[in-house]
Image (tube, rainbow, N blue to C red):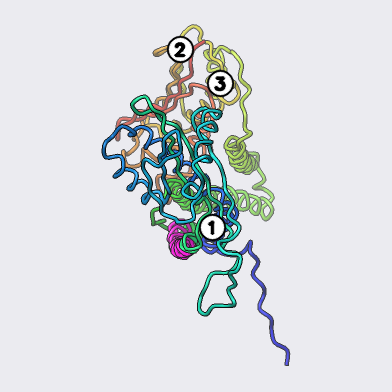
Amino acid sequence: MRRNRQPRVSWGDAPLKHKLIVAFVIAVVLLFVFLWIFDLIFLDTVYESIALNDLKNCVGVISENIANEDLDILIKHIAYHDNACVLVCDADGNELYSQAVRTDCTIHNISTENRVAYFDKVKENDGYYKEEIVIDSFNDNYGETEFEGDVPSEAAGGVKAAVYATVAEHEGVEVLILAEGLVTPQESTRVTWIAMLGIITGMLLLLAALLAAAIARYVARPIATLTDAAKEISKGNADITISGDGYREINELKEGLQYAANEVAELEHYRRELIANVSHDLRTPLTLIKGYAEMMRDIPDEASPENLQVVIDEASRLTNLVNEMLDLSRLQEAGGGLKLKRFDVVKMLDELVTRHGKLIEHLGYKLEYEHEESATVYADETKLMQVVYNLINNAINYCGDDKTVTVKEYTRHGNVRIEVIDKGEGIDVNVLPHIWDRYYKSEKSHRRATVGTGLGLSIVKTVMDKHPGGVYGVVTSVGEGSTFYVELPKC
């Protein structure tokens, strides 16, 4: 029977938490490998450098205190503190002060003539003389196989020592100061250092693993939460609240994702509104077109110019609806740019009001126009004309019983301001913040527009947002009508 093999999980598919733990532990291991290599290779060199510096410091301190009557106490303390043999002698090589910590040291086992020779060596080397001594073996007859227990190996006998010498003057007489010490680490020192390094390595590896787990949890958990939230948003479930805190970047990402979720939720709401509104706007003209067409088919005498005009008008309404939806979509694209130029906005408005006034005159509406002699702006003339056209259509749909819409142009604080005024019902304060939103309708079962398609204010907002210095807004009150306005900097 064949077994189903589980798919292998590659390192790239591993969770971030595991990657952080492994990376952190590997970094610590590499650090300790470097320390161990450095210790095993450079331990003798570092130890020798420190020991030589201690010997030099030893003879220097004794030289500074050569006249002190308690010098013998100081020498004894220095000798045991620095594990060094110390000898102070006169110009003839005779001992004045002496302290030995090893019985086989060189300075205590040489003749007076050899001691005197150090005077000349010190003077030839600017006040300090250093000499290294290699001790191959403590005893050539030693053999570790001749003894029982954990005895040192034969190689343990090879050590290196050093002698430091200087000359000091006391009461007009020169004295020689010698200090000798081992500059090779003893086996006990080496073993102790390696044991301590091993203990520290083990403790720090454990601490690094715990710290890596804590850091991974702190870093990975909020990312995992945001990933789950992003998956929910991608499934269409945008009505979620993203919780949890982290470091600054995670908080910023959380805020951005929450903003995206809110936008998606709002867009979904607008999508449903759009379907409802467009369905309503399409249903009425399509019903009329179908009804009149069937009537004219079944009753040839009904194929009158008036009935045909109804079909044409409703078809035009459908065309306008589709065109404005396409215009709004193009304007909201990142590449939907403007063709800016200087032109007289008064002249443009005069042509628009004259042409549009004739189109709505047969419906009983009246357009009034108040303006300056001229006013130049730097804008997209076609788009600005579309803005005013949509504001006029909006005012016609909601104007009062007098069916009068006023278009006013004047200069205000260096801007050219265009106002479209109606004396209709006004706008409720609760509805006011949403009138510029895409596809927004103030009522679920909205009335059919007399002219236009219901997308005009969204187009106004989008166009004015794209214009440099563009301003738009409305002044309204329930029962007192509305004044929609746009402003552009005056040239």
Q: Residue furthest bottom?
A: 1
Residue that appears at 34% across and 34% down:
66
Q: Nearer the viewer, residue 383 or 292?
A: 383
Dot 2 corresponds to which residue? 371
Q: For the residue marked with disc 2, what is the amino acid?
A: His
Q: Residue furthest top?
A: 373
Quarter where residue 317 is shown:
top right
Quarter where residue 158 is shown:
bottom right
Residue that appears at 41% across and 25% down:
404
Label 2: element kind? loop
**What is the magenta range?**
195-222
Q: For the residue marked with disc 3, what is the amino acid?
A: Leu
Q: Residues within 10 Å of mark 1 (few under 14, many from 20)?
A: some
Quarter where residue 320 is shown:
top right
Query: Which circle's residue, 3 or 2, is located before the other in the chain?
Result: 3
Q: Are marks 3 and 2 in contact (CB under 8 Å)?
A: no
Dot 3 corresponds to which residue? 352
* Disc 1 to disc 3, C-alpha distance: 82 Å
